[in-house]
Amino acid sequence: MTKLHRRDLKQDEVRTKVAEAVKSVSLHGREVVYIILAVVAVAGIAIAWFFYERSQQQASQDLLGTGLEKFNAPVAQQVDPNMPKPAYNFNSETEKYTAAVKDFEKVAADYGNTPAADMARYLSGVCYFYLKDYGKAEQNLKQSVKVSDRNILYYQSRLALADLYNKTNRPQQAIDVLNEALKPSKAQVPKEFLLLQLAQSYEKAGKTKEAKDTYQKIVTEYKESPVSFEAQQKLNE
């Protein structure tokens, strides 16, 4: 009886261990399933986001293109019947830029995190500049400067702002934004061109010495550039 009892106990122990092993495998199996489901879910989100971003990029580029067509459209032009008809033809510059800026502002509002939105903010500022709404022009251009210095807009926006500040008798602010444009070691536009705008801003601010020094820097360091000729003319004056 004692031997039988021990055997039964041994069998019960084996059964318990087997049950625990089965349970463990079952639990680990569930964990694997959960991990697989999580991976599939993340992959699904990534794929959905990819297609969403691509659709956003396409929609923003299309709308930006429409705005650019209006921005570059002819004004009060008689259409030659033998030539392809332009997509847009406006009666005045004011009408043209008013139509274009609506598209640019919609791109910036609806697709704010796309490269098209960065360009749209800049172009909105330019449109408002031409429309002589300098407050809105400055507001949009200040938004468009917030890009990497590897982006051409980093320089274009600051050049446009400098023009705006000089136009509205704020040459010191023009000097400040042009000096910002000159900070990166590898500018995306010719540095001598930025220096020329800076020298002209110094002149407008009445800072004759700084203007002369900047013109001289262009002549000395950028002899082969066409800008050097203009700087030399300024020095001769």
Image: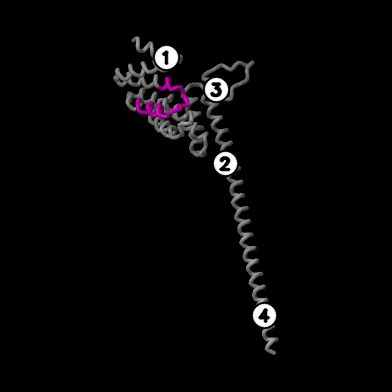
Within-10-Å neighbours for mark 3: few <14, some 14–19, many 20+: some
What distance separates the C-alpha of mark 1 from that of mark 2? 45 Å
Foreground: disc 2 or disc 3: 2
Disc 3: which residue:
89
Q: Which sits earlier in the primary sequence, circle 2 or circle 3?
A: 2
Helix or strand or loop: what does disc 3 sit on? loop
- Quadrant in the picture for residue 164: top left
Mark 1 near mark 2, Cβ–Cβ under 8 Å?
no
What amino acid is labelled 3 in the image?
Asn
Mark 4 near mark 2, Cβ–Cβ under 8 Å?
no
Disc 2: which residue:
53
Disc 1: which residue:
228
| Residue 92 visible within the image | yes
What amino acid is labelled 2 in the image?
Glu
Q: Which sits earlier in the primary sequence, circle 3 or circle 1?
A: 3
Within-10-Å neighbours for mark 1: few <14, some 14–19, many 20+: many
Helix or strand or loop: what does disc 2 sit on? helix
